[in-house]
Amino acid sequence: MDDHSFYWWSKKLEERAGIVIPASRKQFLASNLNQRVHANNCANEEEYYAKVLEGPLGAREWAQLIDCLTVHQTHFFRHLPSVDLVQTLAREWYAQGEGKKRELHAWSVGCSTGEEAWTLGMILGTEAAAYQQAYFSVLGTDVSQPALSLARQARYDRDRLREIPSSYRERWCLPDDLGFSIHPDLRRRVAFATLNLLDKSAAPILSNLDLIFCQNVLIYMPRRTRHQILDRFAALLRPGGVLLLGPGEVMNWAHEEMTPVDHPRTLAFRRRERGKQA
Ligand SMILES: C[S@@+](CC[C@H](N)C(=O)[O-])C[C@H]1O[C@@H](n2cnc3c(N)ncnc32)[C@H](O)[C@@H]1O
């Protein structure tokens, strides 16, 4: 792959999918692209690009390419300080619901194969159980359709059980001969949908959220794009709602509606309550 071609493809990938491939990963891009060009019986990259622009089949192939180029690594209960903050917030919010309907809605952004969304569900579901009428929902979204189809299956290998603390494992996981599945009580409350974070028209399906959980997703994007996405997240939270990021997700982001949450080893911001000053 020559420099011109690398520049052209990396620009297209950034514009259409928000993915940044640094020059140091040129070989990685070239070999994945080459693989897709051959798998589609195309003579060269130009013919392949014309193909990905052609209707629904082209869109499917584009999704396949993005899937090869993005990192999907994930775990249950991946970042324990953030898990601890979610538990603290859920306790606080359900307790505040005295006399009102107790309801929490969370969004797992860039949820990959689902582990993060199930983790949030396990925590919210466990805290909700302390009350007679407490509800929650989790929406997991990702740009990768293959990852989402695994998330929807809600089935994982047995060795992944080790990632889940025993009390959660006992309540929410159903082991079988091959691995384990997520308990139907939780499956009823967690849904998955395809969403590209760069698609500005798609995010407003969500609003008034209690929690937006976004970890290891924006790190692949340029600074300006990250800030624009975070500004949009802020608008989707209810007053008092929290945006919980991965510790290295962003630097120097500030928003007039958002104040930092003080919780050890986490990066989180709370949307100001109406009428409250900083
Ligand atoms: C490394 S995984 C992180 C999974 C999970 N959040 C975690 O921390 O364990 C990054 C995920 O972000 C998704 N992603 C990357 N760019 C995206 C975009 N523009 N819109 C939506 N999802 C994206 C990838 O498909 C991938 O599944």
Image (cartoon, rainbow, N blue to C red):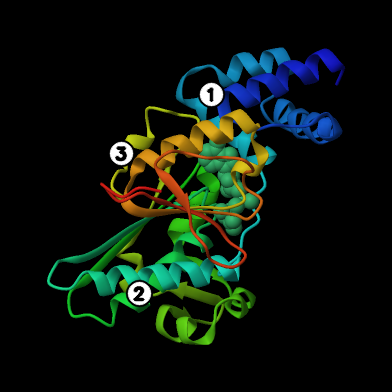
Rendered residue at 59%/22% (across/down): 15
Is the CB of the residue bearing disc 2 within 8 angstroms of ligand 1?
no
Q: Is residue 43 visible?
A: no
Query: Which dot, 2 or 1, sits closer to the camera?
Result: 2
Rendered residue at 51%/26% (across/down): 59
Rendered residue at 34%/77% (across/down): 127
Choose top left, top right, bottom left or bottom right for residue 129: bottom left
Classed neighbour count for the residue bearing mark 3: other residues with Cα under 10 Å, few (<14), some (14–19), many (≥20): few
Q: Secondary structure at mark 3?
A: helix
Query: Which dot, 1 or 3, sits closer to the camera?
Result: 3
Instruction: Identify residue type, mark 1.
Output: Gly
Of residues 264 and 125, the one nearer the viewer is: 264
The disc at residue 205 is: 3
Q: Choose the circle earlier in sequence order: 2 or 1.
A: 1
The disc at residue 149 is: none
Instruction: Identify residue type, mark 2.
Output: Arg
Choose top left, top right, bottom left or bottom right for residue 69: top right
Q: Choose the circle earlier in sequence order: 1 or 3.
A: 1
3D distance between C-alphas at marks 1 and 3: 25 Å
The vertical placement of 260 against 206, above or below, is below
Q: Is residue 225 visible?
A: yes
The disc at residue 91 is: 2
3D distance between C-alphas at marks 2 and 1: 46 Å
Of residues 70 and 24, the one nearer the viewer is: 24
Percent position of residue 189, x then y? 31, 63
Circle 2/circle 1 CB separation < 8 Å? no
Label 1 belongs to which residue? 58
Of residues 11 and 66, the one nearer the viewer is: 11
